[in-house]
Image (cartoon, helix red, strand yellow):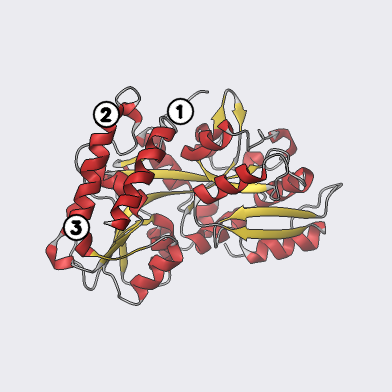
Amino acid sequence: MNNFDVTRRSAMKLLAAGAGVLAAPSIIRPAFAQSKVVNITTYDKFVPQSFIDQFQKDTGIEVRIRLTDDQGKQYNLLTAEGAAPSTDIVTVTGHRLSQFMKSNLLSSLDTTRLKNWGKLAAAYKGAPQLTVDGKTFGVPLLAGFEGLVRNTEYAKASDSWAIMFDDENKNLTSYIVSDFLSIVMRYQGNDGDYVTYGDKPEVAQAATNQARDFLIQHKDKVRKYYDAGSELQQMLVNEDIYLAQAWSGPAAKLIMDGHPIEISVPKEGTFGFLYSFNIVNNAPNADAAYTFLDAILSSPEIGAAMTRQSGFSSAFDGVDKVLDEKERAALSLPPEQVERIQFFSSVNRDMKNEMIDKATAEIKSA
């Protein structure tokens, strides 16, 4: 299996490509549709209802959405279902692709069946994060990063993750433990993505323990650990917290809605990721899945709708021309901050998952 490192220059292209909604253009009807339902496991706000309504009207295919808030939950469900999956399309992040593939859970895409494949933004054509041994395993959807989010009315500006541990922010911060643990490792000068730890498990464990102990030491700064983006948004809107580690999407959505929120990438850096739609191996409605994927690629208005709802940058071409100035601004970062984003790698995922999961449980129980 080949591994592709996305350079910081590539990161700039990826995040800029979709800085660019909400029309519901008629979707080109397929000549035939062998099944009349498509089952999709995805995140909240990823698939616009206007698109679903138009797709069902145009094709007669019923769209059934199952919401998830965690990659691990998707993986566990597919693994448990084995050769008889109940879903056709799942939403996978690029760095978790290898985990799903090792368990033979995903089918490679026949891109010749997607006549709108060429409507991806230039930065995503070829989809290196989704290409393994010359085969493509997903349709690029949305790109994002882990950022430092602050309420601009109450929290002071900072160019360092250190502000999350400042005594003046006691009981005023929040984060996803497993995600923030990797960032803290980077903050401490270690490899939070475990790429360099392949033959150094003892070094990896020491770095993990160092970050774990640091977060336990600073548990008094945490109001609540959160899991879903909607939960984070509610805490920020209610002013229960002033600072957080967050995915860029939920934060950008708040900015678009006019809340006094800012997201930035501190000097120590952070991690980026790419979401994709992936057809499940042995999908019960594979033909309908291809019809759905081709339709969602058909228009920049659809990509813009996804961006407006989720806050993440779209992978579709022309979206930046559909979004208004305020929306584009919510998705933009200064160039020097974009340079600080390192896209997650698929290297040593088993080691990372095992150590991060164990440390996460220990932090929560401390």
Q: Residue at x 35, y 43 (%)?
A: 356
Badge nearest the viewer, 2 or 3: 2
Residue 352, compared with residue 36, is above or below; it is above
Q: Nearer the viewer, mark 1 or mark 3?
A: 3
Mark 2: amino acid: Glu
Q: What's the residue at 32%, 57% (across, down)?
A: 364
Of badges 1 and 2, nearer the viewer stands 2
Where is residue 325 drawn, in percent x and y?
43, 62
Quadrant location of the C terminus in the rendered image: bottom left
Which label was assigned to residue 202? 2
Which residue is pictured at 45% across the width and 28% down the height? 4
Q: Position of residue 160 (x, y in %)?
A: 19, 51
Q: Is residue 317 visible?
A: no
Picture quadrant where residue 100 is located? top right
Label 1 – label 2 distance at C-alpha = 26 Å
Q: Which residue is pictured at 40% across the width and 72% down the height?
A: 234
Q: Are marks 1 and 3 in contact (CB under 8 Å)?
A: no
Disc assigned to residue 4? 1
* SS state under label 2: helix
Give the image quarter of residue 152.
bottom left
Mark 2 surroundings: few (<14), some (14-19) or many (≥20) residues within 10 A: few
Q: In terms of depth relative to the viewer, which is nearer, 162 or 330?
A: 162
**Mark 3 crowdedness (10 Å alpha carbons): few <14, some 14-19, many ≥20:** some
Q: Nearer the viewer, residue 239 or 80?
A: 80
What's the residue type where badge 1 is placed? Phe
Q: Label 2, label 3: how many angstroms apart (C-alpha)?
A: 25 Å
Residue that carries the numbered disc 3 in the rendered image: 218
